Image (spheres, rainbow, N blue to C red):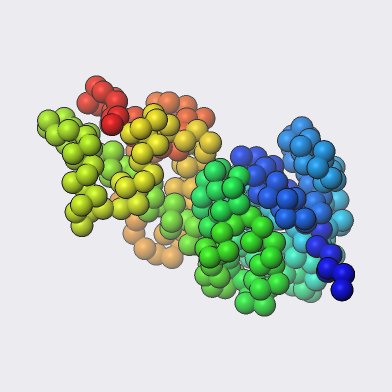
Amino acid sequence: MAATPRPTVGFIGLGNMGSGMTRNLQEAGFPLLVTDIRRESADTLVEGGALWADSAADVAAGSDLVITMLPTPRHVSEVVNGPRGILAGIADGGTWIDMSTSVPEVADRVRKEEARRGLRILDAPVSGMAVGASTGMLQIFVGGTADDVARVRPVLEAMGDPERILHVGANGAGYAVKLMINQLWFSHLVATAEVMAIGVKAGVDLAVLRDSLIASPANSTFVERDVLSILQNGDYDEGFAIALACKDLGLSIDLARSVGVPAELSSLVEQIYRRARASYGDNAGEMTPFRLYEDLIGRELRL
């Protein structure tokens, strides 16, 4: 019996994350139709058999489902709407998966204004940074109906760890879960930088301090694993710019405000991130707030 042909995946956004995600889709055998503001970002994919489209509308018209992976909600809105946007090309009943770190408003507006068209819309933001996108081991948090999630799961599994593709609730839940993960991770980073700077300044050996934290109830994945990119390699993860981290923190604070929950700690973390952005530039890595504390004590924190 012949294998069922793979659906054609339209993919919009070939940046640090989207480039790795599309390579894994291609390696899994999914035909690709892609576009980006930079034509050259698709060169390798096209060499491998992907097709280039000149607009989001063309991507939507020529594919079985459309994925967006874009920097901000504004970019998502621009790509979806307008004379050359997704809505201009997608067929009634078509599928759009937004894998951007975003907020529900854009997709909610589409669902409301285009209700008669029966579009299937899912939010499926990811964690795992550029390395996860490259290796196909992203965590994916999906908001939508159970039937829609099951239908697109083979596509998601080409980009993420099957054990960590989680259906987290109805439409919008994926966005919320991803923002809360980012909010807590950024808070871990700032708290860890502060604790390590104080401890080292007080005369504790950095390795001994970290081992003590790991052995204590204060241990975390960040202390045990993530911070090693800085402590061992001086790598502040420039694969994800601090400007985007500040964007994510701002979206998280906006979400807290919209549901009426005070976010004093997260607001302070956002301020520290914005100070680091002002000090080191928009393109500094997302872990650059660590440098603020290193500068305060006059030494780099390295094992």
Q: Position of residue 2 (x, y in %)?
A: 87, 69
Residue 126 seen anywhere in this rendered image of the structure? no
Rendered residue at 82%/58% (across/down): 8
Q: Position of residue 53 (x, y in %)?
A: 85, 45
Residue at far bottom of view: 147
Residue at far top of view: 298
Above or below, 131 relative to 170? above
| Relative horizontal placement of residue 207, taking residue 136 as reference (left or right) | left
Residue 120 seen anywhere in this rendered image of the structure? yes
Q: Which image quadrant is residue 145 in? A: bottom right
Q: Position of residue 45 (x, y in %)?
A: 77, 41
Q: Which image quadrant is residue 134 in? A: top right
Numbered marks: total? 0
Rendered residue at 40%/36% (across/down): 229
Out of 240 and 102, give the one closest to the viewer: 240
Image quarter of the C terminus: top left
Residue at far left of view: 202
Out of 207 and 56, give the one closest to the viewer: 207
Out of 66 and 106, give the one closest to the viewer: 66
| Relative horizontal placement of residue 132, taking residue 67 as reference (left or right) | left
Q: Which image quadrant is residue 275 in? A: top left
Out of 75 and 180, give the one closest to the viewer: 180
